[in-house]
């Protein structure tokens, strides 16, 4: 699957899936960068996929409807203007011939969904999981976000994680302050190098995340590793919020 990023705002990524001269986009928070790419590369816009209602993921939707030929797929949330097909757990959609299964991932918001393509090991997970971190809790509970991330953690290790923001560096600063690991140190150095030349750090993979992302609960700070899983998750989220 050919996927490229369209940067938006300061640290958002709008993901574009491309076949020939047609793209579908995920979470267009802003229409302008998408329209610019359509013109610059002479591309056509087919479908739009939305992971959750936040403005930085949906803000370009109504304007882009004027340019697109397909369908807007998104969560079951009446408050998002412009969704054509509202999706729930395990529903299947097809865009550009690729099948995506819906995984409900409440926590960051209550309406949050992720799009998973098994054949190509691709996951668009919005603001649920980031590289070396996870979304803040705006609407859900710690239990919900913990369970959502554990659901993602059951996917195969080669799953590529396409998240909604470039937060890897600041996340790794937190992780390396909590956990001593040569792999985390190496990842931190690599990330500094990439970001110094404005290079993207995504997609990550689940196998990498299992070694650098404490929110998957596979690596943990020593002082909380004996806590019950969800309490451990809650403590980590609180520490990150205050970091
Ligand atoms: Zn969000």
Image (spheres, rainbow, N blue to C red):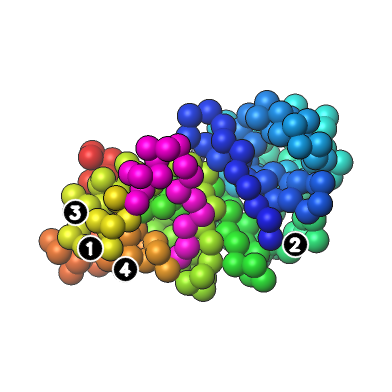
Name the quadrant of the C terminus. Answer: top left
Choose the circle earlier in sequence order: 3 or 2: 2
Q: Secondary structure at mark 4?
A: loop
> Circles 3 and 4: CB distance less than 8 Å?
no
Residue range (magenta): 190-206
Residue at x-position 48% and y-position 29%: 10
Name the quadrant of the N terminus. Answer: bottom right
29 is higher (above) or lower (below) than 150:
above
Choose the circle earlier in sequence order: 4 or 2: 2
Please name whichever residue, 139 or 43, is drawn nearer the observer in this view of the structure. Answer: 43
Disc 3 to disc 1, C-alpha distance: 13 Å
Mark 4 residue crowding within 10 angstroms, few (<14) / some (14–19) / many (20+): few
Disc 3 to disc 4, C-alpha distance: 14 Å
Q: Secondary structure at mark 2?
A: strand
Disc 2 to disc 1, C-alpha distance: 38 Å
Disc 3 marks which residue?
Answer: 178
Is the distance from the Cβ of mark 1 to the nearest ligand 1 atom less than 8 Å? no
Q: Is residue 200 left or right of residue 191?
A: right
Please name whichever residue, 4 or 69, is drawn nearer the observer in this view of the structure. Answer: 4
Q: Secondary structure at mark 3?
A: helix
Inspect the magenta stretch and tell me whether residue 198 lies in it.
yes
Disc 3 to disc 2, C-alpha distance: 39 Å
Residue 208 location (% of width, % of height): 40, 64
Disc 2 marks which residue?
Answer: 98
Quarter location, residue 197: top left
Mark closer to the observer (1, 4): 1
Residue 150 location (% of width, % of height): 43, 65
Q: Is residue 195 left or right of residue 152?
A: left
Q: Secondary structure at mark 1?
A: helix
Disc 4 marks which residue?
Answer: 218
Is the distance from the Cβ of mark 4 to the nearest ligand 1 atom less than 8 Å? no
Q: Is residue 98 left or right of residue 199?
A: right
């Amino acid at each position: 699957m050919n996927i490229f990023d369209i940067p938006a705002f300061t640290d958002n990524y709008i993901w574009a899936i491309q076949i020939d001269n047609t793209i579908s986009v995920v979470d267009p928070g802003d229409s302008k960068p998408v329209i610019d790419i359509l013109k610059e590369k002479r591309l056509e816009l087919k479908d739009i996929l939305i992971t959750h209602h936040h403005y930085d993921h949906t803000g370009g939707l109504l304007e882009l409807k004027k340019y697109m030929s397909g369908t807007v797929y998104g969560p079951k949330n009446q408050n998002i203007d412009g969704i054509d097909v509202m999706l729930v757990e395990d529903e299947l959609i097809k865009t550009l011939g690729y099948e995506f299964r819906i995984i409900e991932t409440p926590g960051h918001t209550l309406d949050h969904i992720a799009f998973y393509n098994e054949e190509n090991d691709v996951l668009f997970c919005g603001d649920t999981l980031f590289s070396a971190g996870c979304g803040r809790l705006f609407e859900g509970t710690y239990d919900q976000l913990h369970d959502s991330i554990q659901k993602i953690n059951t996917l195969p290790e080669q799953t590529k994680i396409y998240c909604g923001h470039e937060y890897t560096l600041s996340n790794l600063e937190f992780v390396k302050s909590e956990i001593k690991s040569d792999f985390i140190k190496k990842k931190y150095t690599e990330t500094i190098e990439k970001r110094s030349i404005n290079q993207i750090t995504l997609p990550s993979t689940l196998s990498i995340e299992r070694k650098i992302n404490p929110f998957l609960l596979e690596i943990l700070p020593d002082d909380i590793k004996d806590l019950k899983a969800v309490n451990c998750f809650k403590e980590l989220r609180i520490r990150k919020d205050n970091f």
